Image: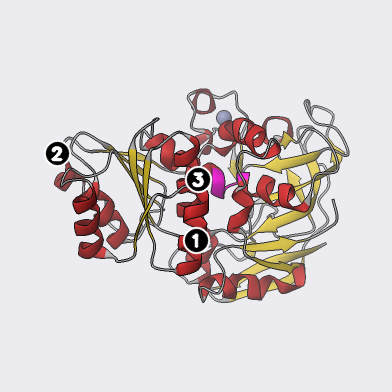
Amino acid sequence: MRAAIFQGPKDIVVGKRPDPVIQEPTDAVVRVVLACVCGSDLWYYRGDSDHAVGSIGHEFIGVVEDLGAEVNGIARGDLVIAPFIFSDMSCPHCQNGSTISCAAGGNFGDGTIDGGQSEAVRVPLAGSTLVPVPGTGHSDATLRSLLALSDVMSTGHHAAVSGGVTRGSTVAVVGDGAVGLSAVLAAHRLGAERIIALSRHADRQDLARRFGATDLVAVRGDDATAAVLEMTGGIGVDSALECVGTQQSIDTAAAIARPGSTIGIVGVPHGQVPFNATFFANVGWRGGPAPARIYIPELLTDVLDGTIEPGLVLDYETDLDGIPDAYAAMDERRAVKSLVRVSAP
Ligand SMILES: [Zn+2]
């Protein structure tokens, strides 16, 4: 089959990988319909994080083509959403809500295991990993939003949940990438009354507004901290959501969180998280990779009834052959998030 191959920083090509087949009775083979490029893929693309040579991509939806004998809960022909990792949902860590730590789990697109940016994927632990989508004939807009549940919207939701967003609360979202915008949408969905989006880009500000942002801060660093503190009477926000992972965004989140609050952090930290600096304000840090498999069912309901449209973060589109530019477009900030259209549903 054809698949994106990570060869090294700034070097993604479309190449050949073996056609996926059932290897374990708990496997499924999924034909990929839509995939996308993650902000975390960019860390590899830019050489800021290591990635093995080989398969890449961990966000996809597709159609089940083949099933092992022990797979329950899905059938051939089902449209399914893949969370960005596979998990058994039965080990102690899954039962405790941290599917990323699954004793039997693993990562799609890690160089060896099939990635989503390909024609098909062998999905291990398919029955406990894949989420079937009810109904048929979904619109392209709906499919794009279902794809967003695979990672980006689940991650934005995790930021909001980790940061303790509740009805009526005041939230600030640090980061206007796809995850930050999704966190705005998630905070709005959870009933936040005031949502301050930190964004310097007009198109991203527009989407933040559409997703529920009530205030915009178009500066960075110390200026952003001063602006948010002024907006909140010097107190800070109930929930600061860190959605980038750079030192500056981590420091901004720490500086605008009100005493006694919890920062929701989902940007992969490429800097130091300053716990000593927040300790005396009783500010906590909570977050990490989202347990997407746990969040997808509730978010799926809201996508299907039109309450949320997280697929709007996908503002660039190509096919599998266009994979190199799908990365370059995000790297060069021509795109917030790149959609890869692989096959017809
Ligand atoms: Zn597990």
Q: Locate residue 276 relative to residue 160 in the image: left or right.
A: left
Residue at 41% x, 52% y is 243
Name the image quarter holding residue 326.
bottom right
Secondary structure under the numbered disc 2 in the rendered image: loop
* In the image, residue 246 above or below residue 185: below
Q: Is residue 23 visible?
A: no
Q: Earlier in the sequence, mark 3 or mark 2?
A: 3
Q: Which residue is mark 2?
A: 281
Badge 1 vs badge 2, beta-carbon distance below 8 Å = no
Pinpoint residue 295: horizontal percent, then vertical percent: 56, 33
Q: Which residue is mark 1?
A: 206
The range drawn in magenta is 149-153
Pinpoint residue 123: horizontal percent, then vertical percent: 73, 43
Estimate the spatial distance between the alpha carbons at disc 3 and disc 2, rounded to whole Å.
Answer: 28 Å
Q: Is mark 3 within 8 Å of ligand 1?
A: no
Q: Earlier in the sequence, mark 1 or mark 3?
A: 3
Amino acid type, callout 2: Ala
Q: Which residue is mark 3?
A: 185
